[in-house]
Every structure is written in structure tokens, then in C-alpha cells.
Image (tube, rainbow, N blue to C red):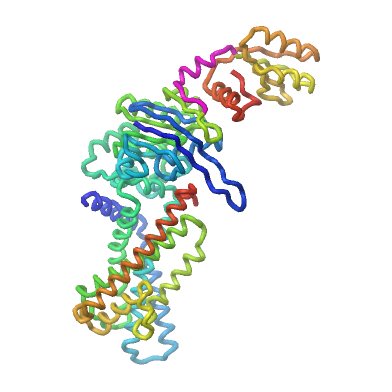
Amino acid sequence: MAKKLLLFKAFLKKEFILFRRYLVNSIGGMLTIYVIFLLLLGSYRGLVGGGDHGDTVEQLVVGYVLWFFMLSTYQDVAYTLRREAKEGTLEQLYMSVHGFGWVMGAKAAAGFFVNSILVVILLRAVMVVTGSTLNIDLLSIVPITIFTLIGILGIGFTVGGLTLVFKRIESFTQMIQFALVALVAVDPQSVWWVRLLPGSYGASLVRRVMIGGAHLSNLGFWECAFFIVISLGHLGLGYGIYRLCERKAMSEGLLGHY
Amino acid sequence: MLKVESLQKTYPGRRGDPPVKAVDSVTFQVKEGELVGLLGPNGAGKTTIVKMICGLIRPDQGQVLINGFNMTSARSSALENISAVLEGNRNLYWRLTVRENLEFFAALKGKNPKTLTSDMEKYIDFFRLEEKINVEARKLSRGMQQKLSIAVAMIANSPILVLDEPTLGLDVQASNEIRVLLKRAVAEEGRTIILTTHDMSVVQDTCERAVIISDGRMIADDKVHNFLELFKAKVYQIRIRGHLTETQRLALLSMNEVAVESESHEGTVLSVRLEDPKILYDVFAVLGQENSFIESIDRQANNLERVFLEILRRSGGGGQETAVI
């Protein structure tokens, strides 16, 4: 396990080095995300008129921040595979003694760590600009968010695997960004099967905590267990699809090609 | 030790094309501390073999054993014993510095960069990268980048190194530097190295042994010295003014020992392998029929490139036009 920790630290260090080395670009990326939120907020207020919109603005804040977190997590896996193949380092990652699954796990964990910092900054900034108050109960929010993102990793692995085999599928991968908006937005309380979709159930639970003021203990054992099983199921399914694609890519000699 | 046993690989055909047999029952081994060249013309199957050795392509049949560990069934242990620099890849993170690349790839190979301080300094010194230690890889010269790629492959102390075209695209000085470093890696550290290259002089200069691949099959495996001895023959290069006539061409090419090396408006160059001295009289007779003007006759040194082409010619794998020793 100590070796896996080394791997995580190596990815984490790399993430921070690149963030610092290309600081202007990094800050530019964060500002873009922030400005997009302001535009969304402005458009929303323009559509519904002025006044107090209560929970709706808070829904927008939580939904947007969650979407950003899910998108970053998805891209950390799906885009990493494409970028590494393009840059000619994917095969070196495959030759790691840790196994490629662990390599991507460490990369995703390092990405989660960095993204968490960005999300906290973003959340704080949008809360200030909207004047919204949210229940920041970390003991409830952190585990729910982690399992929500674990489910999203499944999508990342699926798309990453398909990229290995089919290569240029950018239009498809970009579509996923918009699909994630829908996954965050839909309400699993109104349509039961929405709970089975990656990210949706977790997003509704985060909303219940942050907007509804609920605590993890209020959610109930079976609800939490169902949520965890669904999330792990998505990861397992995504990773399984990825392994099938990887097997095909390794069998046909497509691994490092892009 | 690296053992390649009965490797076979057939790629499925695409869009209705028939399947392509890339590697057909290739078997060879590389002993500890050996530097072996894997040679073959384009499309011979070298890269497929290299990638199967590295566990990046799954063989249809056969196995690769890295210090006794099967690359398929004991992948992790096998990968602890092998590192590679693959052709056509950067093998490095261009936005990381020399030191950061060394540290990152050491961790990827399961080594703690902090415990590798002395190794890090050793390889920085070995590859003469001291002055560039804090420079991003993308800002290095092509030769420096290649040296860093090899340093990155060596930093984890894997006993076996696979280098796919390590001197491709390098200038003469950088290529020579890489050759010296490879020889030192074997002599001073006992590394086992297998390299592929198109540059026969690299193999002749650095490798003890060469394995020659053509059309996916292994057609020769011997010491470089033995190859040169086996095909040792006097070769003469005859330069004539102008072009050959069609009659001359047919007559000369009917002789196994003769090849047309080049033909242009400046003149024609023939190579004649002097296994039997009588052949020179036959060549002169053909040239004399049309009063061809002989500008020079030079004796050529035997080299691995000629040996390689001759082996390919004899195996029927190509190189017929110019294969002469």
C-alpha cells in the first residue's frame, strides 16, 4: 500500500507543479467557470424577474458546483487517456508495476484532491455573489460527494476505454458534458429509475444536505447502502467496459496510437 | 534474462482486408549483460515484438519471460524487471523538468524518489544532464530529450532495457553519445539491452549479437562478429560513366554477385562480390561490349548493412536489388 501512496503522491505533485507552472492558465480556467456561473445566474434572474427566489438560486449554486466537480472527475479519466496517448506517455503508464487500474485510480484521487480545493473556492465565490446560505456539513457532504464521483468515474472509464479503441470520438465525449447537467438536474424523487443513473442520486442527496439541512444520519441505512451500491456498480460497470476495450486495444496493437 | 518463446501475432484485417500475420513463431533469448540488436526492414514485425516484450500487445501464442516472470501471467513482477523507450513516443512529460520527470517515472516504477537521491545524481551525471536539471523537457534538444528518455527508463534500476530506435532523428554527435552511453550501461552496470534500429552502424558499433527479422519470422540470430566473418568477401565498387544499356543490365543482373547500387546522369555504380575472381573478367566483358567508360574501381569494407541485405536477399525477404557483400 505504501507503494500505491507513492504513486498518489507522484500524481499529486505533478498536478500541483503544473498548476503552479501554468498559473495564469489555471486561474483563467477557474475564472471561466466562475464567469459562466454568473452568466447563468444573470440569465436565470432575467428570465424569472427580480426578487427573492429562495431555494431555486441555492439549487442553481449546488447544481452548478456539483456539475463542475463531476465534469472534472469525468475528464480526469476520460481525457487523461486521450491526452497521454496523444503525448506518447500512455504506454509508459501501462508499463507501471502498479497496474494501470491503480495508476488511473491514483490519478483520479490526485485530481479529486486538487478539484476539491477549486470547488471550495468556487463554492465560496458563488455563495458570496448570490448571497445564498447553504448547510456546509462536511461530515455528510464529503462521503456523499466521494461516492457520487465514484459513480462518475465509471463514465470516465467507459469513455476512456472507447477512446482507446475508436480514437477520435470527441463529439461523443463532449456530449457527456451536457449529459452530466441532466444527471445533476433530474429529481430522483419524481421518477424512481433516475436513481439508477450515475450521479443523479448522489446529487439529490447533496441537495438534501446542503439545501434541506439534512444530516447523513437522517438519510437512513438502506438509502445510504442503496446509494453506495449504485455508485460502486457504476464504477464496476465502467471499469469492466474499459477492461474489455483495453483487451481489444492490446490485442489489435492500438494502445498507444492516436 | 529475457526469453521470447514461439511468439505469434496476427492482426485482424480491417474493412474486409485479410488478417495480417505480423509475427510468426519468433524465439530468441537475451542473456544478462548482453546488448542485442533486433534488425529488420520496415514492416518486419520488430515493433510488434518489442511491444509484446513490454506487455503492450497481447501475443496470440507463445510467451515472454522477463527474468523468469511471464509477462502475461505475472505481469507486475515482469514489469519490475523491464523498462522501455518506445519509438514515436515522447516517453516524457514535456512540461516537467528533467528532475521532475526522473522522480515521476521512478514512482511509476514503484521506487521512492527520496531513496533514489544517489541514483538520481548518478544518472544526471551519467547522461551529463547537470546543467539542464531544472529545464522543462520540451525545451531540451532532441538529443538531450532522448538521453533523458533513456535515463528515465534506467532510473528504476530495471535490469532489462528495451530501446526502440534510440538514435532515430539524432545528429551524428548525439547518436555517438547515445552509443557510448549504452555500452557503458552494459559494461558498468551489467544491464541487459535489446534495441531496434534502422542504423546498422549502431548495431555494428554497440551490439554483440543481432537478431534479424523479416516478414514476421526470425531469419538469423548470431554474434555481429560472426555475421561479418560469415559473409566476409571482397567487394568492389565499379563506377562507370553514363547509363547501362538494357543488354548490359540484363547480363549483369543475371550474375548473383553483381548489383546496381545507383544509377543517375552522373554515372552508374556497380557492386561486385568477389567470391570467385573470375567474376571481374565477366563484368569487364559486359562493360567492354558497349565500350562503357570505367571511372574508378574501389575495394569496399565489409559492414553489417551489406550482411543484413544479403541475409534478407537469401531469405527471399527483399533487398534483391542492392544485396551484395
Quadrant where the N terminus of chain B sits is top left
Instruction: Give the quadrant of residue B261.
Output: top right
Residue A74 coordinates in the image, percent (x, y): 38, 65
Quadrant where the C terminus of chain B sits is top right
Q: Residue at x 26, y 36 (%)?
A: B119
- In the image, the segment drawn in magenta is B219-234
| Left or right of A235 on screen, residue B236 | right
Observer able to see residue A145: yes
| Left or right of B171 on screen, residue B293 | right
Q: Residue at x 72, y 17 (%)?
A: B240
Say if the magenta span includes residue B222. Answer: yes
Residue A256 coordinates in the image, percent (x, y): 46, 48
Q: Residue at x 42, y 90 (%)?
A: A48
Say if the magenta span includes residue B254. Answer: no
- Numbered-mark total: 0
In this picture, is A157 found above or below B50? below
In this picture, is A1 found above or below B188? below
Q: Nearer the viewer, residue A10 or A131?
A: A10
Instruction: Give the quadrant of residue A216.
Output: bottom left
Q: Residue at x 34, y 73 (%)?
A: A66
Residue B90 coordinates in the image, percent (x, y): 43, 44
Residue A146 coordinates in the image, percent (x, y): 28, 68
Q: Nearer the viewer, residue A220 or B205?
A: A220
In this picture, is A80 found above or below B84? below
Observer able to see residue B100: no
Q: Nearer the viewer, residue A40 or B12?
A: B12
